[in-house]
Image (cartoon, rainbow, N blue to C red):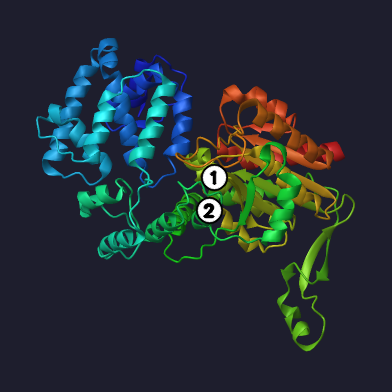
C-alpha cells in the first residue's frame, strides 16, 4: 500500500494529501499515476464532493466511475507521459494485463464494456461498441479540458444522457413487457442481473442503457415511468424516500406542525421524514442493502467484542464519577421502565399496572442524553466505526438507567431523513439497532440541531445533554445532488451560510440549557471554523475509536462546572 501511495504522491507532488484509490478503481500502477496527475491538474476536493453526490451512493457506481476514469485519462494521459516519462512503462504493463483479462473473460458490466472498447486500439482488437455505447465513447474521446468545472459539467451531462431514464420513455405496457422479460431470468433475491443478459437492442430501445437491475427495482422503474417523477417536475418524492429509507413512523399532521415551526429561512420547504428503518417490501433492494450494512457493522463489532465491552465498563465508571457522582440513586414502581417479572401477576388480577421499575436520582436532578449522528455519504467509509462508538456510549448510559436517545440525520432530495435507533424509555436491548447505521445523501447540520433542540425542549429532564457527531461540513446542494431534477424549491445550504446557521442552532440549544458537545471527524483545515461553531465544548478526533473517550471527558468537564 505504501508504494501505491508513493506513486500518487510523487506524481501529484503533494505529500500531505490522503490517497483514496477507490476514486479511480485503482488496481494498477498506471491508474495510480493517473490519480496522482488528476490531483495535480484538477481540484481534488471538488471531485470527491462530486463523487459523494453523484456516484458513491448509486448501485451502478463502478460503471459511473469507469466513465469518469476514462474521461479524465483521455484528457490528461499525454500530460502524464510528458511530465513523468517513466509512466509509459506502467501504461504498457497495464495494457498487457488488460489484454490477458479480456482474452479469456467477457465483459460483465457496462463499465467493462466501455473499458474494452476504449482501449481496443492498444489491445489490437476489434472495437465492440454499438449504438449509445459507441456514442458515449466518442463523447469521452472528444473531451480534453483541464478545467475542473468543465470536467464535472461534462460528467453531469453524460450521466444524465446515458445513465438515466429519458423523457421519451415508451408506453407503459411496452415497458412492462420489457420488465417481464428481465424477470424471466428467475431472480429470487436482490442479486445484480448482468446487463448483457438483456439484448442491447432492448436496452437502447427503452433508454435504460446502464442500470444495474435487481428484482426489487422493477417496481420502482414502473412507478417512476407511471408517475414521471423525475422529468415532469413533480415535487413529491416521498415514495422514493420511503423506498430508500423505510416507512415513516410519525403522523403527517404532527410532522407538518414541526415543519411549520422549524423549517424556516434557509430551510424553507424542507420536508421532515421520521423513520426507524423498517421496510414495507420484503424483497426491497434497499432493505437488502441496509441488512448487508447491518451485518458488516455487527461483524466488525464481534471481531473485537471484548475490547468494546471493556470500553463500555470504562465509560460507565467515568459517568458514575462525574455526572452521577453526587446523586443518590433510588427506584420506584412505575407504569414504564424495566419490567419486574415477579410483579406481572398484579396487572392480571388487579388494576395495579405498576409492574415496572424506574430509577431516579436526587440532588442534581434526572438526566437525558441525546446522541445525534451525521449519516451523510461522507460517513460511509467509517459507518461501522460510527455505529460501534455510538453503541458503546448508549450501552454505558443505559446501563446506568440514564434516559438515552440515538438518532441520525441526512438529506435526500428535499427531505431531511431522521432515523431513530432508540428513544429515552426503550429497553436496553434497543441499543443493538444502532448497528443499522448507514451513510448516504448530504447534511443540513443546522436544521438537524434545530430539530433535536425542539424535541429535547419538550422532555421533562432537569439536565439535558446533546452529543453531535459530524464531518464538520454542513452541505446540501439541492441543485447538484441529482441530475435532471426539477427545482426542489429548497435553497442551497453551503459554505459560510451553512456554517453560520449551524452555529446559530448550537447557540440556541445552549440558551435552552442543553449541554452540547460537538465531535468533529473532518479535515484539519476546517478545525478553526468548527471551534467557532462549537466553542470550548468541542473535540476533534482523527481516530473514531476515541469517540467514547471524548464523551467521557466531556461529561467530566460538565460535572466540574456544576460542582
Residue 265, quarter of the rendered image = top right
| Residue 241, disc | 2
Residue 116 shown left or right of residue 7 in the figure: left
Residue at the spot 75% in from the left edge and 41% down from the top edge: 555
Report helix, strand or loop for mark 2. helix
Residue at the spot 65% in from the left edge and 44% down from the top edge: 269
Residue farthest along the bottom direction in this orientation: 349
Cβ atoms at labels 1 and 2 below 8 Å apart: yes
Toward the viewer: 146 or 165? 165
Toward the viewer: 20 or 264? 264
Q: Is residue 556 visible?
A: yes
Q: Where, quadrant-wise, is the N terminus in this rendering?
A: top left
Residue 485, placed above or below residue 178: above
Residue farthest along the right direction in this orientation: 363
Q: Residue 92, position in %: x, y?
A: 17, 23
Toward the viewer: 139 or 319? 139
Residue 297 shown left or right of residue 215 in the figure: right
Residue at the spot 60% in from the left edge and 30% down from the top edge: 494
Residue 100, placed above or below residue 323: above
Residue at the spot 48% in from the left edge and 37% down from the top edge: 53
Residue neighbourhood size for the residue with mark 2, other residues' Cα within 10 Å, grouped as few (<14), some (14–19), many (≥20): some
Q: Is residue 29 visible?
A: no
Residue 263 shown left or right of residue 488 in the figure: right
User: From mark 1 to mark 2, how far is it between C-alphas?
Assistant: 8 Å
| Residue of label 1 | 413
Q: Residue 280, position in %: x, y?
A: 51, 65
Residue 151, placed above or below residue 391: above
Residue 123, quarter of the rendered image = top left
Q: Where, quadrant-wise, is the C terminus in this rendering?
A: top right
Amino acid at each position: 500500500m505504501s508504494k501505491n501511495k508513493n506513486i500518487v504522491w510523487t506524481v501529484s507532488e503533494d505529500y500531505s494529501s490522503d490517497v483514496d484509490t477507490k476514486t479511480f478503481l485503482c488496481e494498477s500502477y498506471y491508474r495510480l499515476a493517473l490519480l496522482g496527475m488528476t490531483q495535480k491538474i484538477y481540484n481534488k476536493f471538488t471531485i470527491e464532493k462530486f463523487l459523494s453526490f453523484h456516484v458513491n451512493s448509486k448501485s451502478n457506481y463502478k460503471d459511473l466511475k469507469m466513465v469518469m476514469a476514462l474521461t479524465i485519462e483521455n484528457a490528461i494521459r499525454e500530460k502524464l507521459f510528458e511530465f513523468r516519462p517513466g509512466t509509459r512503462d506502467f501504461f504498457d504493463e497495464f495494457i498487457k494485463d488488460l489484454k490477458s483479462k479480456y482474452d479469456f473473460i467477457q465483459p460483465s458490466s457496462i463499465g467493462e464494456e466501455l473499458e474494452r472498447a476504449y482501449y481496443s486500439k492498444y489491445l489490437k482488437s476489434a472495437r465492440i461498441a454499438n449504438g449509445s455505447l459507441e456514442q458515449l465513447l466518442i463523447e469521452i474521446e472528444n473531451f480534453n479540458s483541464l478545467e475542473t468545472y468543465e470536467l464535472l459539467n461534462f460528467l453531469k451531462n453524460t450521466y444524465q444522457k446515458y445513465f438515466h431514464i429519458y423523457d421519451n420513455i415508451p408506453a407503459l405496457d411496452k415497458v412492462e413487457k420489457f420488465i417481464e422479460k428481465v424477470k424471466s431470468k428467475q431472480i429470487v433475491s436482490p442479486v445484480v442481473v448482468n446487463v448483457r443478459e438483456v439484448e442491447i437492442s432492448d436496452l437502447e430501445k427503452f433508454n435504460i442503457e446502464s442500470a444495474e437491475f435487481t428484482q426489487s427495482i422493477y417496481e420502482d422503474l414502473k412507478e417512476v415511468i407511471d408517475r414521471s417523477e423525475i422529468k415532469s417536475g413533480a415535487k413529491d418524492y416521498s415514495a422514493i424516500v420511503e423506498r430508500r429509507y423505510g416507512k415513516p413512523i410519525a403522523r403527517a399532521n404532527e410532522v407538518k406542525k414541526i415543519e411549520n415551526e422549524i423549517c424556516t429561512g434557509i430551510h424553507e420547504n424542507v420536508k421532515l421524514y421520521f423513520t426507524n428503518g423498517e421496510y414495507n417490501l420484503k424483497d426491497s433492494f434497499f432493505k437488502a442493502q441496509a441488512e448487508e450494512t447491518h451485518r458488516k457493522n455487527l461483524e466488525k463489532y464481534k471481531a473485537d467484542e471484548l475490547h468494546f465491552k471493556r470500553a463500555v465498563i470504562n465509560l460507565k465508571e467515568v459517568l458514575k464519577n462525574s455526572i452521577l457522582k453526587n446523586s443518590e440513586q433510588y427506584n420506584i414502581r412505575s407504569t414504564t421502565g424495566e419490567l419486574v417479572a415477579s410483579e406481572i401477576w398484579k396487572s392480571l388480577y388487579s388494576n395495579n399496572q405498576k409492574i415496572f421499575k424506574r430509577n431516579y436520582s436526587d440532588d442534581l436532578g434526572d438526566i437525558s442524553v441525546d446522541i445525534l449522528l451525521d449519516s451523510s455519504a461522507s460517513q460511509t467509509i467509517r459507518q461501522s466505526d460510527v455505529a460501534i462508538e455510538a453503541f458503546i456510549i448508549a450501552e454505558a448510559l443505559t446501563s446506568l438507567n440514564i434516559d438515552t436517545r440515538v438518532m441520525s440525520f441526512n438529506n435526500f432530495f428535499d427531505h431531511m431523513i431522521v432515523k431513530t435507533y432508540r428513544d429515552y424509555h426503550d429497553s436496553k436491548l434497543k441499543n443493538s439497532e444502532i448497528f443499522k447505521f448507514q451513510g448516504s445523501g448530504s447534511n443540513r447540520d443546522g436544521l438537524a440541531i434545530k430539530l433535536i433542540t425542539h424535541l429535547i425542549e419538550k422532555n421533562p429532564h432537569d439536565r439535558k445533554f446533546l452529543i453531535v457527531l459530524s464531518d464538520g461540513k454542513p452541505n446540501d446542494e439541492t441543485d447538484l445532488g441529482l441530475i435532471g431534477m426539477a427545482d426542489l424549491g429548497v435553497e442551497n445550504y453551503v459554505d459560510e451560510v451553512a456554517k453560520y446557521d449551524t452555529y446559530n442552532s448550537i447557540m440556541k440549544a445552549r440558551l435552552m440549557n442543553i449541554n452540547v458537545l460537538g465531535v468533529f471527524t473532518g479535515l484539519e483545515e476546517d478545525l478553526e471554523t468548527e471551534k467557532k461553531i462549537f466553542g470550548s465544548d468541542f473535540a476533534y478526533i482523527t481516530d473514531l475509536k476515541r469517540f467514547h473517550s471524548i464523551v467521557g471527558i466531556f461529561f467530566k468537564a460538565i460535572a466540574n462546572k456544576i460542582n
